[in-house]
Image (cartoon, helix red, strand yellow):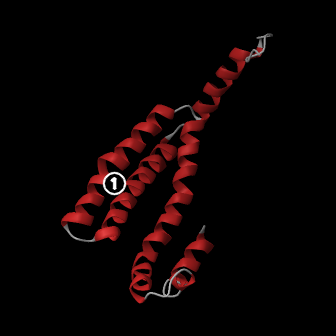
């Protein structure tokens, strides 16, 4: 994750020439590469945190966080930055990154505040519930 981020930042002024010879496109890519680097970092952390929460059985909570962060913050912020403040693609991307940052912060907060000993006890209860069952969980 960090290696890709460093490569994107180091090659930001030349990476677009793999795909185009246009100077205007190269300048736009160079301008957007720091956002790509931030997206790479955040999208390496956020899915892990979502997976932890889903693994704990908090699927509904994660769904609400996703919807709230992206539709409640990311899209409106991106629209305002992109169209009202005329930042274009950079503004739209900043808005979506804002949603991802908020989602990551919320999931980090929940992960660090969780009583993991209590979660282990609850997990054991769920496993013991199925321990005495002799019939298969799935039938053909």
Single out the residue that lies furthest toward the right: 134
> Quick check: 105 above or below 66?
below
Identified at 57% across, 82% down, the residue is 18
Identified at 30% across, 67% down, the residue is 91
Identified at 34% across, 68% down, the residue is 89
- Looking at the rendered image, the quarter that the N terminus falls into is bottom right
- Looking at the rendered image, the quarter that the C terminus falls into is top right
Residue sitting nearer the eye, 46 or 8? 8
The answer to whether residue 90 is left or right of residue 135 is left
Identified at 27% across, 65% down, the residue is 82
Element assignment for label 1: helix
Image quadrant assignment for residue 119: top right
Q: Mark 1 Cα within 10 Å, few/some/many (few <14, many 20+)?
A: many
> Quick check: 136 above or below 78?
above
Residue on which the image places disc 1 = 74
Residue sitting nearer the eye, 87 or 102? 87
Q: Position of residue 139 (x, y in %)?
A: 75, 14
Single out the residue that lies furthest toward the front: 21
Q: Where is residue 69 in the image (x, y as percent from the top left)?
A: 36, 48
Q: Position of residue 75 (x, y in %)?
A: 31, 53
Q: Position of residue 136 (x, y in %)?
A: 78, 15
The answer to whether residue 71 is left or right of residue 126 is left
Single out the residue that lies furthest toward the left: 84
| Total count of labels | 1
């Amino acid at each position: 994750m960090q290696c890709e981020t460093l490569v994107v930042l180091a090659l930001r002024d030349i990476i677009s020439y793999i795909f185009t010879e246009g100077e205007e496109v190269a300048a736009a890519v160079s301008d957007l590469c720091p956002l790509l680097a931030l997206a790479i970092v955040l999208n390496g952390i956020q899915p892990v945190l979502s997976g932890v929460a889903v693994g704990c059985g908090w699927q509904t909570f994660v769904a609400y966080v996703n919807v709230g962060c992206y539709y409640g913050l990311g899209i409106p912020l991106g629209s305002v930055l992109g169209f009202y403040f005329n930042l274009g693609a950079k503004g739209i991307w900043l808005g979506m990154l804002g949603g991802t940052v908020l989602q990551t912060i919320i999931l980090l907060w929940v992960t660090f505040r969780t009583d993991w000993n209590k979660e282990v006890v609850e997990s054991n209860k769920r496993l013991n519930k199925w321990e005495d069952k002799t019939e298969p969980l799935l039938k053909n």
